[in-house]
Amino acid sequence: MGIEITWCDQLLFNGPLFSYHVSLLVIPLILHPSFDLPLKVFFADVVLPLALPKTFIYRIPQNMVEFVEVGIRVVVPFGKNKLYTGIIEQIHDRAPVGYTAKYLDDVLEESALINEKQMKLWDWISSYYLCTKGEVMLAAMPSSMRLGSETKYIPNPAFEGDITGLSDKEQMLLQVLHDREVMTAPEVSEILDIKNIQRTMKRLLEASAILIMEDFKEGFKPKVEKFVRLTEACIDEEGLQAAFRSVQRAPKQEELLMAFVQLSERYSAEAKDVQKTVLQKRADASSAQVTALQKKGIFEIYEKEVGRLIYGEGGGAGPIQLSSIQEGALTEIRNSLEEKSVTLLHGVTSSGKTEIYISLIKEQLELGKQVLYMLPEIALTTQMINRLKAHFGDLVAVYHSRFSQNERVELWNTIGDKNSTKAKVVLGARSALFLPFSELGLVIVDEEHETSFKQFDPAPRYNARDASIVLSGIHGAKTLLGSATPSFESYYNAKGGKYGYVQVTERFGGVALPKIEPVSLSGKESNTGYFTKELLDAIRDTLKNNEQIILFQNRRGYAPVLLCNTCGWSPECTRCDVTLTYHKAQDRFVCHYCGNRYTAPPSCAACGSHGMRLAGFGTERIEEELPIYFPDATVARLDLDSTRSKNAYSRILTDFQNGSIDILIGTQMITKGLDFDRVTLVGILNADLLLRFPDFRAGERAYQLMTQVAGRAGRKEKQGKVIIQSQDPNQWLIQQVKHGNYEGVLNQEIKERKEFAYPPFTRLIKLTLQHREAEMVDYCAAELKNELLKILPEHSILGPEYPVVARVKNRYNKNLLLKLHRNQNPADFKGKMKNLTGPFFAKKEFKSVRLIINVDPY
Ligand code: ADP
Ligand code: ZN
Ligand code: ZN
């Protein structure tokens, strides 16, 4: 920032704005008449990672004035003895009114960490989703980039770096941390009597000498790989020749040595490290053969920490030969994006959308642009990354919530670095949106209909698809939405001409869409009642053909309820109003709302009877029962419970991919864009469950889920089969799924949405009130509604109403649903609402009530 001198750091303006202006004009002249430039005092608005609604203003010490700029991180004091890392949002000369600004404590970097475009996105999210910028900051930045007083540090147990490279201060700090094991920055600061400790912490973090406790809890371990080098004796040319002679009679060893020479690029200017596994692969040798060379004193094996980012190793995949249908779609998309900034690609499952995306990405890379490829869940990335890396190698990087803090920071820095040749294409879920892109050319939102693009808790409760479109707009880039079952909003926008629309109705290679067969559960033949005869027969045939099966049951656990045979009582969570689900593997009854676990009740709590039975079925029970029918088949389960550990997900998928699993049972997780060559049968075990969603999107959702899971069947050369089990196979929606009539479902539903004023004809804002006492939420909700009637007509406010599960974790919830008509300016309304809810919840009686605002809640 080009700010001219200033000379006085001591002036404090604690009066009203008025005296500040007076001081500005008068004081320099009086005190320092010899100075010809007037004193300038600068303040910074700082976003802090807190949910507090207002902006905090800090005074910039004169010695920092020339270093600060918008978007950099600063350390600021907050409350009593607390320090936070915040981001400068604005620099100005307006002193705060009503309090004396504290000074910035420290500046953490030389240039903006959050660029202007990122700031714009933060602004949009906080104003559209009615949350604070602090909340956006919490979602946007890896936690190790916003260290605060509470952040706990530990020494990195795997750090073997060179301590001599550290400054005295850093070494001292490291020593203290080693002695005390866990410390916060203020504690370190006190012991060492050093101010501005955060900067030192930051450097030690960057050097991997220390870790943040949170990472440690996440089980973060720096990734160490084995490398191979020549021993001292063999390193020079003479030694190497001798080594070659000594392996003359062991062809494999000779080959290994040769491969090493090549891989290490020994004769080039810069010799390279050689990873042991890479070497083995190149020479097609075993680990034992490398060890043999080690024993001969030729190789030395050492360990080294390697970058943790999943960059592609591939590259080198040949150019894609698009089919003429794909070529046609590609041309249409290009033309459409010339005119419209957003285009919807509506292509049936397996129509080859990914290959079309790849062609578009190539074009952007040639233009030197970045590409953001959004996927609804990291789950999907496992397969997608392999496909993309085959084409783009290191240019592709993945970003997702299961990464450790260090991994996130590493990727953040790579993308922020304009000179980097890596990570030009980012594949990520929701939060990838917040990375420091500087020149996005294209944003692809794959499976754009997926509800997991929406973040429900905590704030910001944003929809990443919608925010992506905004982000793309900020960059002047283009957005391509893709789906086999587009969301109603996107479809409606496309049909109305707001978005471009490109359709592909055929699968790649002319593969037939699966044959869908709805069957009735009521005449079930199996004694347990989960499987119809049709499904069992189909599974048998499929196994016989050595093909694979996916079974979809949208309920995890073993059985949803334990019922008393005498009175019908079933155990409920003590903290939530829901019955518990039995999980057999842990032999516990689990609350799916709060996670509480309970042991089995010894008898019925209502009537004392001992006759209790488990009713209904979840994925776990299916997994247990299948072997009764198919003892030779290998069965696996893919749901939240089976994929808790970091790599479980990809392990299960890999096993399924390589054929070591025959039948895969799963919840919605398996519906998402997975592509398996040998799956020819999909069974939907209970479609009725899907049709019972409690909101206005029930039809849309059920259609999407069934169609998506059906789409997993019959890739490549064989038509797949899908069996949908339900109480009534003739239900209208199931029949539409059978005939692939999405248009019909849309037309039907859109009429109802129009009639009852639901999206896309209105915008919804859900207000949820939470309190420990039911009377309080009742009272507060009624009062709030009265207030809201001042700014909205009665028919635009639904409720107050208890949700299906009214009490969660001992808090009662009550909802008000506001409907804004399309012609109503949302920004305008939101402003009014803020002005109303602010004072309302500041009232003493309502201070303890929690308000949750959810814009576009469904
Ligand atoms: P979608 O994303 O529309 O469901 P995919 O992109 O996964 O479809 O394509 C389905 C299958 O067809 C994949 O196995 C993919 O590798 C293959 N495929 C698609 N386009 C081509 C192409 N042009 N050349 C070769 N294989 C293709
Ligand atoms: Zn009972
Ligand atoms: Zn509970």
Image: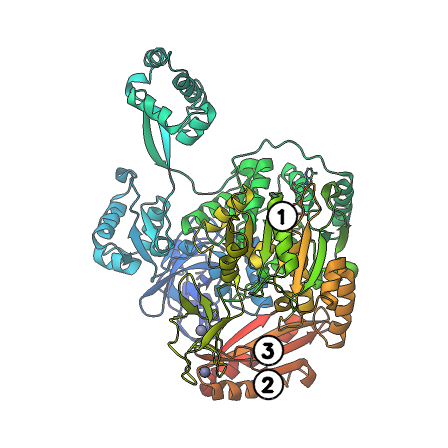
> Residue 453 vs residue 43: left or right?
right
Q: Can residue 803 be seen in this snapshot?
A: yes
Q: Residues within 10 Å of mark 2 (few under 14, many from 20)?
A: some
Could you say which is closer to the camera, residue 393 or residue 653?
A: 653
As helix, strand or loop, the secondary structure at mark 3 comes to: helix
Q: Nearer the viewer, mark 1 or mark 2?
A: 1
> Residue 98 vs residue 475: left or right?
left
Q: Which mark is residue 785?
A: 2
Give the percent coordinates (x, y) of residue 368.
Answer: 62, 39
Marks 3 and 1 in Cβ contact (< 8 Å): no
Question: Of callouts 3 and 2, which one flags the residue occurring earlier in the amino acid sequence?
Answer: 2
Q: Which residue is mark 3?
A: 833
As helix, strand or loop, the secondary structure at mark 1 comes to: helix
Amino acid type shown at disc 1: Thr
Q: Which residue is mark 1?
A: 542
Could you say which is closer to the camera, residue 209 or residue 384?
A: 384
Could you say which is closer to the camera, residue 24 or residue 220?
A: 220
In which quarter of the view is residue 786 placed?
bottom right
Q: Can residue 474 be seen in this snapshot?
A: no
Q: In the displayed structure, would residue 580 be above or below residue 482? A: below
Amino acid type shown at disc 2: Lys
Question: Of callouts 3 and 1, which one flags the residue occurring earlier in the amino acid sequence?
Answer: 1
Amino acid type shown at disc 3: Met
Which residue appears at 31% of the width and 24% of the height?
A: 294
